[in-house]
Amino acid sequence: MKDLAVYARDLLGAMPVSYGDVRFVETHLETIEVKNSVPRSVTSNTSRGIGIRVIADGSWGFAATSDLSRRAVARACRLAVKIARAGKRALVTPVALSPLEPIVAQYVTPFDEDPFEVPLEEKLAALFDADKSMSAEPSVKVRLAHYQGFERATVFASTEGSLIEERIVQCGGGMQAVAVGGGDSQVRSYPHGNRGNIQSTGFEYFRSLDLATHGPRVASEAAALLTAPALPEGKRTIILEGEQLALQVHESIGHPTELDRVLGMEAAYAGTSFLTFDKLNTLRYGSEIVNVVADATAPRGLGTFGYDDEGVPAQKVFLIRDGLFVGYQTSRETAPVLGQRSNGTMRADGWNRIPLIRMTNICLLPGAWKFEDLLADSDGALYLATNRAWSIDNKRLNFQFGTEIAYEVKGGKLAAIYKNPSYTGITPEFWNSCDAICGEKDWVMWGTPNCGKGQPGQTARVGHGTAPSRFQNVRVGVVR
Amino acid sequence: MTERAAGIAAQALDLSKAGQTEVIVSSSESALTRFANNTIHQNVAEENASVTIRAVAGRKVGIASGNDVSKAGLKRLARSALEIARHQSEVPDFPGLPGAKPVAEVGAYSDATARLTPAKRAAMALAVIKPAARKGANASGTVSHDAGSLAVVNSLGVRASFARTEFEVTAVIEKETGAGYAGAISADHRRVNAKAVGSAALAKCLKSQNPRSIEPGEYTVVLEPQAVAGLLSYIAYMGFGAQGYVEGRSFLSGRMGETLMHESVSIWDDGLDPGGLPAPFDYEGQPKSRVNLIEAGVARNVVYDTYYAAKSAGAASTGHALPPGFTGGPLPTNIFMAPGESSLDEMIASTEMGLLVTRFHYINIADPARAVLTGLTRDGTFLVKKGRVRYPVKNLRFTESMLSAFSAVEALSRERSLESEMLGAMLVPAMKVSRFRFTGATEF
């Protein structure tokens, strides 16, 4: 498909465009779900096509086709130019891109075992074992064990001379037990809410999850939640498990630091951001121990790659340093507003979508605490684990999350449990109340494969590295 | 328009060597012009055709999908689905593929809409942008259209296909301290007035300036149709599908026949009603039936596909299967809510103290068993006092059981509006609720 991408790029070079790029993308997603000992769904999905993006008369145009004949690709090139020119009537400022030197390169996700080479029977066997491991609890009415393998091959060619080939491989899975009784239903999951956890690596990651070992605990906690009290309303010290903290980072740091949101480009759908330019290098986003990076170079993240979908090399940049807000996630179109070059966060959901600023791996850097020391130091706190619900306003200030379970911390241990836990807050107040972050040993790269943005809608696969962390004076128990 | 999809489906069916085979072909030509800051900033078009093959070998089922519709591509796909089935374990409760049933014709396609050009979309975007710019406001939004066809065939004789178009204009207009939203959707673009959509959003934006803070708490609310649709789409997702109901996870589980909402509330699904965006059959090629979900406040039914109908005594598919591989079970996608006898103005006039809500943002499920949702107001929230809209207020977060909210309905509007939501377009009235719990406030 490299030839076709180069063919299209060369066609664009002869058209009245100031810039053009071509992305051939082929994705392959394998999903397996075993439910109550039945293989409810085994699917293999492939999608391939070519997307043509141009700037003509100062406006963007984009056309995509799944027809890979040269005739159809040429038609798509012409349509992209026509669309761009139609936008001229509503043009305020012509699009200008930050500079980028041409790059000719290849990138492949490092992995040991190709997920697509592992026989289906082996994957099913692991999921049946996981399902069975949850079967001892009579009140658990729904047992789910699931797997996914994903790969994406991209050829990127631009009229500036870049030609990049990339293969991303991702793999993971998880399990869930749903207990039903007394007019209630309660859920517990491992290792992550209802999506399991996925990393950019090979089948070895799915093996390492060792689902069946965790099944008995997952099932017994789901059953116990049915008779547990609901978390009372109040202001408490809370410790967030890394997986819940990953979504907290996603919603209250990842999205508001996207520069396109700040510039109003997403106002019609997901919203804007409270991080107006006056806050850059002045806002105390969090306490001094809070350091957050956008790191597309971090191993195993779902936002790990060689080059973004504008051909910009993967980078690691600080968004929050020692608690101070210091940077946005940018693109070639938006970075010049700050007098900068793109920091490489443009990604598209396949061949048929334009790249948008998407989180890479937005990671809360590890702190100094050992988890056991943190528990020992937190008598009377709550430990909230495994995301169940999430919601945040359209400027990313007022958030409310629900988790599957909350534990009282007593004598350095996790003790009594509560059901339907929730907590709520305002973004900077919350991050400024962070007084402890666990270290490398407890730091995990979590995957969020379903981040929605844009119109038409796009789903991005993004990563978040976090370790359990403590926050003071947080309002809990809102759901009653 | 449907011939190509039906032809691809028939060809794929011929190429399959499975015991039973189902082929779904979905083809689409779509375009979207997106604007923000009074300029068109994203402008896209796409053509695609995807094929999903469900191959059955005994009681083993494999699903493969792709978008290579060449003969070689279809052959590969058919082989892949069968290969998955052969290597998969038995599905003991698999009822087999369904047989053919008569499918109604629906008028869901507009050729003029299918042929809209980038220039026409730009003109409609400008109809929103220019009046906003004249008032010093910032317009954002979309003008989009999609022309597609769906064909479902199987080896037991199902042969169903139809063509549809969809056209939508949305506008969020912002100025300094407030914003306004409006939108419209139809199968035919000639029934949507982009300028009127823009005017409505602009008027709301201008009224939303300088919002005041109010304390969270319990308020009477007057919900405009977009706000009602936001709540209803999550109610439907949580409760109206057979999967959650059978598994005991739906708030309707074990409560069929009970009064769960106010007697003025009736909700149903009807894929054939031209008042919505009709679709005559589901992803198994089964005809869509009208299903009464809530009738005068009483829980009556959920929607079924073939699999969950077979698991439920006395149930039959209601034509609500979603594509194979979707693991959430059957769901309603053509929802209607009965009108009342009031109007938005009358609801406001009858309110001593309450809030007028344009729409909600980022709704999510806080407790599915009790149908508790959380979310925030957005793009136009106002305090109503002594029968009049007094001033805009800063946005609030709600956390409320929908069974409580829909039991406290005081009035529904005669007029209904087609609103685009998570589960598809739904025709809903405005609604006044006597008690609605807001649990937090935000800063704008």
Image (cartoon, helix red, strand yellow):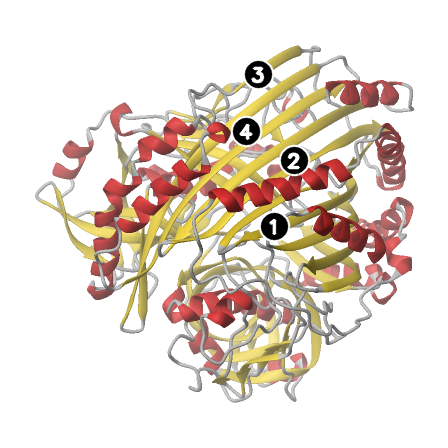
The amino acid on which the numbered mark 3 sits, given as a three-letter code, is Tyr
Q: On the same chain: label 3 and label 1? A: no
**Amino acid type, label 1:** Ala
Residue appearing at x 32%, y 65% in the figure: A185
Does the residue at mark 3 contact the one at mark 2 (Cβ under 8 Å)?
A: no
Q: Which residue matches tag 3?
A: A107
Q: Which chain is home to disc 4? A: A
Query: As rendered, which of A279 and A301 lies closer to the eye?
Result: A301
Task: Depth check: give the residue in front, A423 or A448.
Answer: A448
Q: Which mark is residue B72?
A: none
Point out residue B136 in the picture as x, y percentages from the top left corner. 76, 49
Estimate the x, y position of residue A240 in percent, counting from the top left: 29, 42
Q: Does any portion of residue A476 appear in the rendered image? A: yes
What chain does badge 1 belong to? Answer: B
Figure check: A45 above or below B187: above
User: Residue B319: horizontal and vertical position, in percent?
Assistant: 62, 70
Q: In this figure, which residue is indicated by the disc labeled 4? A: A328
Would you name the residue on which mark 1 appears?
A: B18
Q: Residues within 10 Å of mark 1 (few under 14, many from 20)?
A: many
In space, the residues marked 1 and 2 are separated at their CA atoms by 31 Å
Comes first in the chain, label 4 or label 3? 3
Q: CA distance from mark 3 to mark 2?
A: 17 Å
Q: Under tag 2, what secondary structure?
A: loop
What residue does disc 2 label? Answer: A350
